[in-house]
Image (tube, rainbow, N blue to C red):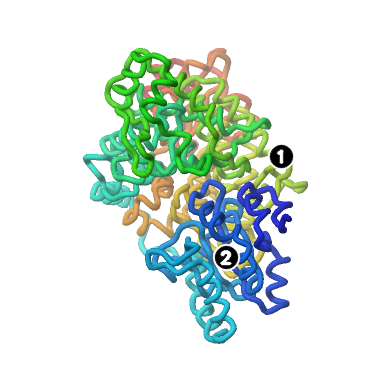
Amino acid sequence: MSNRLASETSPYLLQHAENPVDWYPWGEEALGRARSESKPVLVSIGYAACHWCHVMERESFEDPAVAALMNEHFVCIKVDREERPDVDAIYMDAVQAMTGHGGWPLNAFLTPEGVPFYAGTYWPPEPRHGMPAWSQVVAGVAEAWRDQRAEIEETGRRILPRLAGAAALPPAEGELDPAALDAAVATLRRGYDAELGGFTKAAPKFPAASAIEFLLRRGEREMALHTLRAMASGGMYDQVGGGFSRYSVDARWVIPHFEKMLYDNALLARAYLHGFQVSGEPFFARVCTETLDWALRDLRQDEGGFASALDADSDGEEGLFYVWTPDELRAALGDETLAVAALEHFGMTGLPNFESRWAPVRATRDPERLGEIKQRLREAREQRVWPALDDKRLSAWNALMISALADAGAALQRPDYRDAAVACAEFVWNEMRDADGRLLRTYNRGQARLSAYLEDHAFLLEALLTLYETTFDPRWFAAARELADTILARFADPERGGFFATADDHEELIARRKELEDAPIPAGASAAAFGMLRLAALTGEHRYEEAALGVLRLLHVVAPQHPAAFGHLLQALDFHFAAVKEVAIVGPGAEPLERVVRDEFRPHLVLAGGPADGVPLLEGREPVDGRAAAYVCERFACLRPVTEPDELAALL
């Protein structure tokens, strides 16, 4: 018998629809019941690709006796953190405040008003490793609520100010200073692992795409390029099919946590593209294209949008889809010569808990038959039981992929990437807005729903500007401007500056927060600031720049102290201080001029071309003697137009 999750569209919620727990989705029905019955709430938060979420479901939520205990004492709510990042952020702060650590599954006990009073992550079905059983936790919290309610409610009131996050943060003292950028680089260097790459020497290691992008913008090649090489040379990178796992369990980037997320791969594909543009190393271009090809092959849906993730588990085991025994590898290749070449190239590495199975890592040798090896291994692997696909489409994560595809399409002269970016943008813009034109968060099973957050608007603002610069289609410029105006109208904080994570008419929660750190995707506020700065350079409108500066003023002191957590904000700050070139290209036969701009990594530049419809940078720009011309400007003060590629290159 299904519970109330059966009508949801989130794959994670649907996974729990057959549990004997009387789960509700987050909403007024559940919270209203809790208030009317004066009953505490148990909110359990996770996501479809979360390994330990699956484990806790199998061990506890599918147990009828445990479910009966939960149903008796609590109103039980199940939340997909990817659909509801606002709810997740509040209760993640709570569990970190209470326990000193966080993670998923996240299980929080709330008063009927939604205030947390006890929280944790995974609990086992039986007492283990000093942890009580989940049933003991449930029974103990229920008893405490019955006997100590007044004390519990007072504890909840004390934690409330913490849950507002950075909403009360005032602008930092002092003026914005470009020296902050050098300080951020120095801080990254102090934490840099010069042997193994990355910005911490400890395990686990996460791919810090935003920090790498910041370093490339500052001209710091060593740390950025070494880290890119290291990440793509280990097991965290899928050497057979392309694409990156979520993180490396060890410090050497070898042993992956096998879930594959859309957002990681969009951000990393772009970082490898820029690494290629900076260094000219073909390896980086190959990793970029293999990653995008994997996303197009395994995540793209029929309407052009991209699914959210591939699970870590298949056939009940984490990583089983990706690992090999030597005999399995030989059988898949069907050729001992190929098998020897594969073992030499990949330098197979053993994985703990996998009983003689191996994950491919990249060695230095690159045999001529590598393409054939990969193709045969991929074909064999595709016959295995696949990891589950979280096929919901999220506006924010699709926007990140639009940016990656558009950027790579322009730089690598790949029309297929450009066309995929356009198709995805058309899907989001046409299918993920409501009847009033307001952006929605999630789409699945033919239905778009849930109000979009700042990150959805901000990532899409950046994506549509990148897509405009790739296609010169003015509809994307107009759409980007519409998004920017929506951000200013509905998310801005006129008192302290910056932007709230939720719109002014969003469902009222116990706190309206500002999310300022990259965790692990760029913060919505940083993306909004960066997008506004780019839009200001394309329009000359100071209001966009001033709104961006509101974010920078909040964080210009703390960001250099913690650059790994503020990589995207530091990119925006770098753009603000740079002598940004505004390039307008007009006239027929402009491809040679466009290539001058697109072939190099030019992070301090905005580009306009094609029809002038509504694009201020193109107003009054004309070809020269019938020839395509490029106008190079700074703050809309332009040099004389040039018609030769060499002339344009000299000005950039």
Tell how many labels. Answer: 2
Q: Name the quarter where the N terminus is drawn.
A: bottom right
Q: Which amino acid does label 2 sit on?
A: Arg
Q: Residue 176 carries which label?
A: none
Find residue 112 and report its horizontal and vertical position in percent.
64, 75
Q: Which amino acid does label 1 sit on?
A: Glu
For label 1, the residue is: 431
Q: Name the quarter where the C terminus is drawn.
A: top left
Q: In which quarter of the image is residue 399?
A: top right
Find residue 357 and report its horizontal and vertical position in percent.
37, 34
Helix, strand or loop under label 2: loop
Helix, strand or loop under label 1: helix
For label 2, the residue is: 512
Q: Distance between the residues labelled 1 and 2?
A: 28 Å
Specify few, some or many for label 2: CA neighbours under 10 Å numbering under 14, 14-19, or 20 or more: many
Q: Looking at the image, is 34 positioned above or below residue 564?
A: below
Q: In this orientation, does residue 456 appear?
A: yes
Find residue 474 and report its horizontal and vertical position in percent.
63, 31
- At 43% from the left and 36% from the top, the residue drawn is 244
Q: In which quarter of the image is residue 97?
A: bottom left
